[in-house]
Image: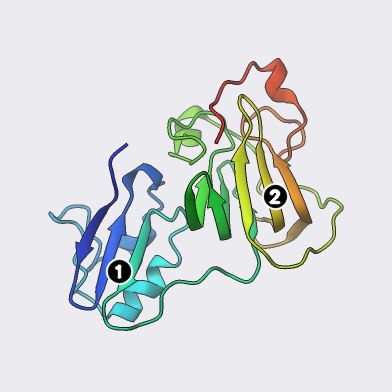
Amino acid sequence: MPKPRTYDGAEIAISFDMSRCIHARNCFLKLPQVFDPTRRPWVDPDAAPAEEIAAMIRTCPSGALSYERRDGGRAETPPAINRVAVWENGPLAVAGDLQIGEDHLQRATLCRCGLSKTKPFCDHSHAEGGFRATGEPAEGEGAAEAPGPLQVTCRENGPLVLIGPAEVTTGTGRRVKQAGKLVLCRCGQSGNKPFCDGSHKAAEFTADPV
């Protein structure tokens, strides 16, 4: 995978990790003067105030964009509640104090269709593959947990396992479940999406552990 590229400006440095981008176009739609894919280089970190750029980057769902302030402005901090948002016919958008493999992240979109070539991250393969799954699952049982980090792991040929306090929500924000451990489908075959029901075994799903 290509390494993240950093674009240095006078007040802010912007990093872009292509391997995690899901082409939500959030950046271009909100700050086209800074992020323009038709231009080379496509990122101009001096084309808008640093705080405005930082605020936009914090809305990047995949975490492909990140920043470092050069002007003494505040760094990004994780939200108070670790959240797993279930997107209609799409990935799991996770935000919080995340540990995924060796990476400490605050935002990521995780594949739940089983088709991504960059697992555990989404690469938009769900669109080409015709993946269909509701973004409004039924409410389940669970209780709130004390705040803390969220460890995200992937079982070999199996589900995503999240250890730590988290709240699962629909794409529109309705709470589905709160728990200290979540086992979530990443093969695309579960009959109880977004949760795993063991269907990966019958489907002979293959994917590396993380």
Mark 1 or mark 2: which is in front? 2
Mark 1 → mark 2, Cα distance in angstroms: 36 Å
Say above or below: 49 vs 135. below
Look at label 1 and name its amino acid: Leu
Measuring from the top left, give residue 93's x and y in whole percent: 56, 52
Which mark is first along the chain, 2 or 1?
A: 1
Q: Nearer the viewer, residue 181 or 129?
A: 181
Say above or below: 163 vs 124. below
Measuring from the top left, give residue 162's x and y in whole percent: 67, 47
* Residue 7 visible in the snapshot: yes
Asked if the residue at tag 2 contacts the one at tag 1, i.e. Cβ–Cβ closer than 8 Å, the answer is: no
Measuring from the top left, give residue 126's x and y in whole percent: 50, 35
Q: Quadrant of residue 114?
A: top right
Query: Pointer 1: what residue?
Result: 31
Q: Residue at x 44, y 39 (%)?
A: 124
Q: Nearer the viewer, residue 126 or 205?
A: 205
Look at label 2 and name its amino acid: Ile
Query: Pointer 2: what residue?
Result: 163
**Residue farthest along the front direction in this orientation:** 102
Q: Is residue 209 left or right of residue 51?
A: right
Measuring from the top left, give residue 42's x and y in whole percent: 19, 57
Q: Residue at x 80, y 49 (%)?
A: 138
Label 2 crowd bin: few (<14), some (14–19), many (20+), radius 10 Å: some
